[in-house]
Amino acid sequence: MSRRRSDTPQEQRSAENGSEAQASSSEPLGETPGQAVGGRRLALDVHGRLRDMILSGELPPGSVLLQAEMARRLGVSRTPMREAFRLLQEEGLIDARPDQRAKVRGVDPEDLDGVYGARIMLETLAVSVTAKSLAAGDLARMGEALKRMQELADQDQPDEWHAAHREFHGIATQAVPPHLQRMLASLGEHSGRYIRLAQLGMPSSWARAHTEHEALLEALRRSDPDEAARVIARHLARTALNVLADIAPEYEPAATRTALGIAGNGQS
């Protein structure tokens, strides 16, 4: 399998360069005097902004995060920033130990395997249920999202591509209850950084993913839950296995392979 990435992993390059997190493109969240914004809500807003920056790759693995600097750039005080850092550490996105600078965590093979194992199981369930209930308008919106994804991939606009990608998968899983939709959304966001690594490590993955998305849409058009389950299970597993082969070839992805074996049979 040929790869175009450097032999040095992204997280090592970032750490070796001693890069400190830059958020110059971020607009201040702001703590305007007199504005009735609760401290908890502001901390959650800060956490959401930083989380998006990490998962999108804007803050790559190994980036140093300075509370004072990030607070200044986002236009908030140190208090909500400390709470945001605590939440990011609980999620495993940063390492923030006492008396040490916080850093964006590198890619953890065990985390990737667990996220995709869970996503395969839940998303195959969701598409199987949804396959039986999609209306013509839903399928049309999926087709439009897929067309945008193809155009955005050709134009090398990854952020816009990921937005269309979330819409596509969201429609394909929309028939499950809200609490399951929230779980799927969380797993989808968490896997965003791994999708980007797959796209960087193997540029041909863009075309392969498009073919798989087309196959999923066709299965849903036929209201075929078994085939939809097989397609989505293999699609998700391929991304996970490709990234793991690139960053940790010695790691055995037991969760991903087991989930693929269970869900990939497409029995509804």
Image (spheres, grey):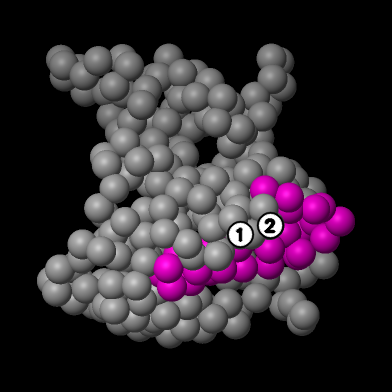
Foreground residue, 159 or 208?
208
Res. 146 image quadrant? bottom left
Q: Is residue 161 visible?
A: no
**Left or right: where 44 falls relative to 235:** left
Taking the spot 42% from the left edge, 68% from the top edge, the residue there is 226
Foreground residue, 61 or 100?
61
Q: What's under tag 1, amino acid-wise?
A: Leu
**x, y percent for residue 36:** 16, 16
For marks 1 and 2, give the CA distance. Answer: 5 Å
Q: Tell me which segment is drawn in magenta.
A: 226-255
* Disc marking residue 260: 1
Query: Which residue in the structure is indicated by mark 2?
Result: 257
Q: How many marks?
A: 2
Confirm whether the magenta stretch covers residue 15.
no
Res. 26 image quadrant? top left
Foreground residue, 4 or 261?
261
Q: What's under tag 2, amino acid-wise?
A: Arg
